[in-house]
Image (cartoon, helix red, strand yellow):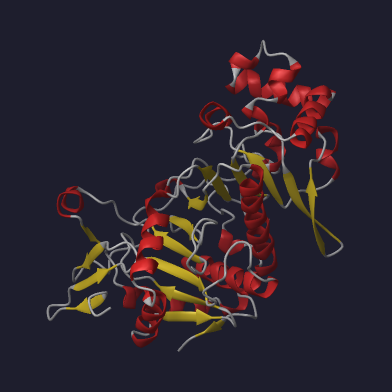
């Protein structure tokens, strides 16, 4: 662990990611650059326009495939509604919606052709019912006309079995595009503008969606969970959403985690000791930590569950609330103007070793270029100590917006 983080005499900081082996340097003088180099052009928002700015907005819900589920709130209670018929979509207000991605990374036909996958009878019956209903058929006709003209000649059975009604790439969409009462279109609703309670529902809904993807596809070895915030971070829309993609391989990131833990069983404890010794722990709850990450391509925050065996299937309600509270705090600190990738790392079902859930928030404030490609060494503009100091200071100023579970470290 001695090589994981070191500062040279001239101020250069060298980092090595203990899981991936990625080598990162921070050179003096680059950390003072503005995190957001260019202000977003803003335009006034007309009354009612805030609910129809993009295809993810609540008044344009017919531009996304049929919902799998939605989260609603009534009289202070949260509830998940599943398989809401098209005719009843306006009967409740969805705080979060789970919909298939119209542009899948891996289509339903991928699983059929390569693995012989077949839809479960219950799922196929739900799809047939949607196709058979007048409102459902009208919804699908709009999607077909705009995005799937080849399905225009499909009969009802072929349409019900098609990926336009969903596969194994889902999107969790938040209700708001802009904050309530916004006057300009740059007043975006981000993870950090949600209340702590809303964010906890967002996380719980997402993790349950991931578990359902595993349960619904026996050939899925991994479900990749991520959130791209703002276009510089790869988002198609500046509308808050997460994505979940079932894949048939573990992928390089999971494999590196598995190999690191297998080769060095104490790597997790050693890394946690390093974070504490270097004062990189920014905030804590009873069961999780928010830290400045070491060895990432970009300045990064990490949220860890403290129990080593915590995963998508064993996480307790308190652990989920703690994890959500710290992830929400990280987003509050960053503000909605900072582009970021939110990446979820956890133990996949086939991994025998313990691996706690960790969420990495990468600040997309620079672009890797020729030096990185040629050397394999990445230039990270802000070292972990500065990331920790800045984030801690931001949290102190915004402490009234945090969950009461969160304790900022000194």
> Which residue is at 51% across, 30% downward?
114
Q: Nearer the viewer, residue 391 or 312?
A: 312
Quadrant of residue 168 within the rendered picture: top right
Horizontal and vertical percent position of residue 189: 59, 55
Q: Nearer the viewer, residue 14 or 178?
A: 14
- The relative height of residue 59 versus residue 311 in the rendered view (above or below) is above
- The relative height of residue 80 versus residue 55 in the rendered view (above or below) is below
- The relative height of residue 278 versus residue 123 in the rendered view (above or below) is below
Horizontal and vertical percent position of residue 377: 20, 59
In this view, the residue farthest toward the left is 10
> Which residue is at 56% across, 50% downward?
242
Number of numbered markers: 0
> Which residue is at 75% across, 35% downward?
123
In this view, the residue farthest toward the top is 153
- Residue 10 horizontal side relative to residue 406, left or right: left
Quadrant assignment for the N terminus? bottom left
Horizontal and vertical percent position of residue 113: 53, 26
- Residue 364 horizontal side relative to residue 113, left or right: left
Task: Determine if residue 364 is in view.
Answer: yes
Quadrant assignment for the C terminus? bottom left
Task: Determine if residue 172 is in view.
Answer: no
Q: Nearer the viewer, residue 120 or 190?
A: 120
Horizontal and vertical percent position of residue 360: 45, 63
């Amino acid at each position: 662990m001695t090589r994981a983080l070191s500062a040279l005499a001239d101020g250069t900081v060298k980092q090595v990611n203990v899981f991936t082996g990625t080598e990162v340097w921070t050179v003096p003088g680059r950390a003072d650059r503005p995190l957001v180099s260019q202000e977003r052009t803003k335009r006034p928002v007309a009354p009612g326009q805030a609910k129809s700015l993009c295809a993810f907005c609540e008044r344009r819900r017919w531009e996304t495939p049929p919902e799998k589920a939605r989260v609603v709130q009534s009289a202070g209670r949260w509830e998940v509604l599943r398989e809401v018929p098209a005719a009843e979509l306006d009967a409740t207000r969805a705080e979060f919606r789970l919909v298939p991605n119209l542009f899948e990374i891996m289509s339903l036909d991928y699983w059929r052709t390569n693995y012989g996958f077949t839809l479960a009878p219950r799922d196929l019956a739900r799809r047939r019912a949607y196709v058979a209903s007048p409102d459902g058929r009208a919804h699908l006709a709009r999607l077909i006309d705009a995005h799937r003209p080849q399905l225009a000649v499909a009969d009802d059975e072929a349409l019900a079995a098609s990926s336009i009604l969903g596969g194994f790439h889902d999107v969790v969409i938040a209700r708001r595009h802009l904050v309530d009462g916004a006057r300009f279109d740059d007043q975006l609703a981000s993870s950090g503008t949600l209340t702590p309670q809303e964010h906890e529902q967002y996380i719980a809904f997402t993790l349950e969606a991931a578990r359902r993807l595993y349960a619904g596809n026996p050939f899925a070895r991994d479900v990749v969970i991520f959130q791209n915030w703002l276009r510089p971070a790869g988002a198609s829309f500046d509308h808050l959403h997460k994505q979940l993609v079932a894949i048939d391989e573990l992928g390089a990131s999971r494999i590196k985690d598995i190999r690191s833990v297998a080769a060095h069983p104490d790597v997790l404890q050693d890394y946690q000791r390093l974070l504490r010794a270097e004062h990189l722990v920014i905030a804590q709850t009873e069961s999780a930590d928010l830290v400045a990450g070491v060895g990432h391509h970009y300045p990064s925050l990490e949220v860890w569950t403290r129990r080593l065996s915590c995963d998508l299937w064993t996480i307790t309600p308190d652990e989920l609330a703690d994890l959500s509270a710290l992830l929400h705090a990280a987003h509050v600190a960053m503000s909605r103007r900072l582009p970021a990738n939110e990446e979820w790392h956890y133990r996949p079902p086939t991994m025998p070793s313990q691996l706690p859930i960790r969420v990495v928030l990468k600040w997309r404030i620079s672009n890797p270029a020729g030096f990185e490609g040629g050397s394999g060494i990445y230039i990270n503009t802000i070292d972990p100590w500065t990331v920790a100091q800045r984030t801690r200071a931001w949290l102190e100023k915004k402490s009234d917006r945090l969950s009461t579970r969160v304790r900022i470290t000194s």
